[in-house]
Amino acid sequence: MKRRNFVKSLALASAGTPILLNEMKFQSIGKKLFDVSKSADDRVLVIIRLNGGNDGLNTVIPRDQYSDLTIQRNNIIIPESLVLPLTNEVGLHPVMTGMKGMYDSGKLGIIQNVGYPEQNRSHFRSMDIWSSGLIDTAATTGWLGRDFDNHYPNYPDAYPDAQNPDPFAISMGYEVSSTCQGLMANFSHAVNNPFDVYNLASSGAVDDGTYYGSHIDYLTTLIDQANAYGGQINTAANAGNTMSTMYDPNNPLAVQLQYVAQMISGGLQSKVYVLNIDGFDTHDAQVSATDTTTGTHADLMKRLSDAISAFQDDLQLLGLEHRVAGMTFSEFGRQIASNASRGTDHGDAAPLFLFGTCLDFSLMGNNPTVGSTIVNQAGIPMEVDFRDIYASILKDWFGVASSEIQSLFEHTVTFYPMLGACSLSVEEEDDLAQDKALIYPNPSFGNSTIRFAAQNEWVKIVVFDLMGRQVAEVFDGNLNQGRHDIKMELTDLQNGEYIVNIQKSSGSVSCNLLKAK
Amino acid sequence: MPDQGQGPGVSLSMTPYTGPWTKAEAAHLLRRTTFGPTNQEMLDAVTNGMNATVTTLLQLPAATQPLTYLAEETIAPFGATWVNSVYPSDPTAAQTVETARILSLAGWLMQRLNTEQLSIAEKMTLFWQNHFSANISADARASYEYFNLLYNSSLGNFKQLVKDVTIDPNMLLFLNGATNTLYSPNENYARELLELFTIGKGPQIGPGDYTNYTEDDVAAGAKILTGYIVDGLRSDTMTSVTSTFTPILHDTSTKTLSAHFGNAVITDNGANEYADYIDIIFQQDEVANHICRKLYRYFVNYDLTPIVESTVIAEMAATLIANNYDVLPVLTELFTSEHFYDISVRGALIKSPLEMIYSMMNSTGSVPAFNLETNYEMEVSMYWFAETMGQAYGSPPSVAGWPAYYQEPSYSKLWVNATHIKTRFDLSSWMTIYTGIPSGMESWKVDALGFVDNLSLPADAPTVIDDICDVFSPKGVDATQKLILKAILTNSLPDFEWTLQYNEYQANPGDPMYSDPVKYRVELVLARFFQMPEFHTA
């Protein structure tokens, strides 16, 4: 039998499946499959601010320098045996089991030594720098706000509109994030609880052209927007879902991330969510007197790790993993040597986390070098400029053109591969021929996506092992003409090489897949 | 930025204001210097004139003390103050008492804002709380003393206040001064002393150099400040928390400051070395500029343009320096200046949550008048409402204070976003047309009848609306809005129907059949007004 005939007969065979079952199958998995992000437009970035300056050396711990670390921070050091190992050189704080699991499955990326030249050790100035992405000029706009301004000029006037019914960004809690500050107004909408119902009175007051008038105008716009956006958020929250059982209702960050999952799954089109966790300014008693693995900093790390891993679990269950990526940031790290109050003072660079399934990397950059001599006030020197991380995220995740990204910053931008594992460049996209397919990420850590082109035809995707045995069926149904991204859940597969076969009426395509842990 | 902001015709003069002195000018002064003036206070200020009103405002009423109102306070008797009471020896019992004291402290702070008195003292105390921003510490007695210090020094000498705050136990605890020792300098307070409390941080002009000071100055300052420890925290024998200088913990080495302080050398002076250091910091005139900018943004306008900097701020700073950092002459100059009354700066601020809450309550003369416990509980509820809207008095979000007072470019706009405006609206409905704040059998809400009775012509509907607009909006309300408000007051009936209703209520005192309809109509008008943008500006 010729190959083509084999495929056709397969097609006929599957036509015998009861219609109802086919429909149901299509609907139940189909929604999930077709929700995979098709373009940068429905991608979401979640930013978590660690307010106060996180102690990077007790978060991502350089395991290869324990004797020096013991000299530098004897009263706060985590016992070496309790550190959660990621590699031989690097480990995590013992409470960060959730994020360790994410690292192991390729969903957590760590960038070492992130900061900026000539670190400013003032909380306020440094937070302004991180929020604005600007160092030399006064920080009156946020890095995301400037990008929004490029795409939605004249905000907030005339928004929301038919094309943009939802807030461009959401700040969880009561404050709007200065990362989203645009020229005229903040692009983020503060949401404390997305189920709150808005029905605020509006007013006919007018702007008289003075400071007073500008406030009246601001308040009037705010009230109208609050009603409009509030309604959209309500609708999304009520339509949305959350499936993970890992959220701890006593962990405020987890509660907020659960709300975020609820809003995203409910179809809210906001592109950015900003969350905040306070308390990182650990000048004293960052560890408890009796056990350095407990105390203020450990509690914060646990909250962060538990909340993010619950959120990632939820996204996976909701089939939203490929649409959502996350990032943490803090205004600075802390000094290498601890002080006598079991705390640490303001320092320089620190590690930064990215999370999601579309990461291009697990660990980027070298371990910080702590040295055996205590140098007064010494911090960790910067190696990766945080502005380049912003730039790379804009490029990889939101598909912003390089030239436009460069225009947002003062320095010459360097792009790193960060969140490109789920993307294809525009050129590659156009070239995706009928006989090609691409799996990403590959090697797969459990969840990958296969991208291919189809005509209006029936398609079936099957995974075979090297012995030719079918080990998984990924998809079976009709597809429209065009490019498709089909998610493959491969968590059950053992590590090793596989062949993924796309059977289509127009011709079959095969490609290799490597499953790894 | 508004076009006419600091354009032609705006007076930048600090010479005494001699223009018209009407209810509008008097109300502007009272709105900026107190929490919620009444219609009568505005009329009195017109009668008394600007100078006499400013003199009255700049007096400091006697301080009060927080009182015991909860059964959990097992040491101090009910109705007496606990500020000099010990704690139980058992830590768990001490924690229970501490919780009762913190709630009493919160209620007391709100009660002070809710007290009708023609004084700037509470506005200035909040200014200093925003400036120094120490959170409530682990011992309510220390926190009380700190707030008391801010109140008693609110109209005093800035340099002395910085010295007093530097060794105040609550501050020593808040910014780790209490653990800053020879053996392990902790830079936390030393940094904020320069960056926020005195000279302020300029642009970074070199590695570790912030124009007005350097990282080395921070390190030197930490050494200078070593040696103060805090005693008596939650003590079962000591009746107050004290700060004590402990010579063996003090770094006696000679410290040299950077060129920004003329390379000043500070030699060991034990317990008084911190004061020597503060004297040297205050030799730099930038200290005066820094604090005058903050005063300006707090009392006048967030937009501090280069022209304002070179005129208004320069003159305020000169006055402050000429008076060796006494703040009273600067405030007197400011509140009697042409610039302060310029039309361009009226209504230029958005009310903070505390201003919003107490402009509703104070301007309507609404104070909880139940028993001690109920009164405290109601004010504590207000404390939480203010916290929800972004202004918890005892715990500013960071040591820089509330972002609405310093964060470019939005400043006071940061007080209201989509979440906060909803809370404001919900609270205003609650305090007017709904049940108010309940406690036990009682409920505290806006006193609509007392308010309307004290207006200039309560039986005349248009005058009632005019007065309400004068009291609650800095630039009035347009004719259409006034008609809407009047229609709410009269239930869309002819004006004389309101007059009849009001007069019947007056003729039948104490009869709810006549008073309830009047009360409800006024509540409806206030509910509407509190949800208008005009109300949220000051």
Image (cartoon, coloured by chain):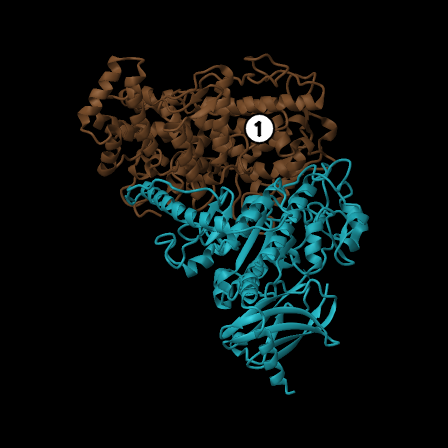
Residue A58 in the image: state x and y as whole percent. Answer: 71, 47
Residue B261 appears left or right of A513: left
Residue B345 appears left or right of A239: left
Looking at the image, which residue is at 77% across and 39% down? A291
Residue A305 in the image: state x and y as whole percent. Answer: 66, 49
In front of the other: B232 or B508: B508
The residue indicated by pointer 1 is: B165
Residue A73 in the image: state x and y as whole percent. Answer: 76, 44
SS type, badge 1: helix
**Tint of chain A:** cyan
Tell me: residue B403, above or below residue A34.
Answer: above
- Give the residue furthest to the bottom: A2
Residue B331 appears left or right of A261: left
In front of the other: A14 or B197: A14
Tell me: residue B201, above or below residue B57.
Answer: below
In front of the other: B238 or B425: B425
Tell me: residue B53, above or below residue A68.
Answer: above
Name the amino acid type tagged 1: Val
Q: Is residue B51 shown to the viewer in this render?
A: yes
Looking at the image, which residue is at 64% across and 19% down? B240
Q: Is residue B454 shown to the viewer in this render?
A: no
The chain painted brown is B
Residue B242 in the image: state x and y as whole percent. Answer: 65, 22
Chain for disc number 1: B
